[in-house]
Image: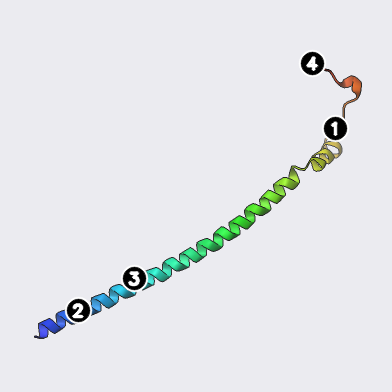
Amino acid sequence: MIALWLLLLSALIAELLGYTWVRVQCVRVGYEIAALNRDTLRLTELQDNFKVELARLKSPPRITKIAREKLGLTLPAPKQMMVLP
């Protein structure tokens, strides 16, 4: 009879340990998902900032200003142009 009680008690303890392990894993995975969601949000904001910066850098007025001021480029005179057939 004692062996049966010990067997039942062991089964109950094993079940409780298994349940506890599953709950701990569930909470751990929940924390990982939350961290990944934060990272995704941060990276999306960073990507949006990069898109805005790229649009600013590619703007024609900015490129024209750099070409004139830093590179010394000017528009060609009419006699400097050649029309190719």
Mark nearer the N terminus (3 vs 2): 2
Tag 1 residue: 73
Q: CA distance from mark 3 to mark 4?
A: 76 Å
**Picture coordinates of residue 62 (x, y %)?**
81, 43
Residue behind mark 4: 84
Query: Is 30 placed left or right of 12 in the picture?
Result: right
Which mark, residue 15? Answer: none
Q: Nearer the viewer, residue 4 or 69?
A: 4
Q: Quadrant of the N terminus?
A: bottom left
Q: What residue type is disc 1 on?
A: Leu
Q: Are marks 1 and 4 in contact (CB under 8 Å)?
A: no
Q: Secondary structure at mark 1?
A: loop
Evaluate if marks 4 and 2 touch, with contact meaning CB atoms under 8 Å apart. Answer: no
Q: Residues within 10 Å of mark 3 (few under 14, many from 20)?
A: few
- Image quadrant in which the C terminus is located: top right
Q: CA distance from mark 1 to mark 3?
A: 69 Å
Total marks shown come to 4
Q: CA distance from mark 3 to mark 2?
A: 18 Å
Check disc 3 and report its element: helix, strand or loop.
helix
In the image, is residue 73 above or below residue 40?
above
In the image, is 37 to the left or to the right of 1? right
Density class for disc 1 (Cα within 10 Å; few <14, some 14-19, many ≥20) is: few
Disc 4 marks a residue whose amino acid type is Leu
Disc 2 crowd, CA 10 A, few/some/many (<14, 14-19, 20+)? few
Residue linked to disc 3: 22
Residue 82 coordinates in the image, percent (x, y): 84, 18
Colour mode of the rendering: rainbow
Residue picked out by circle 2: 10
Q: Amino acid at mark 3?
A: Val
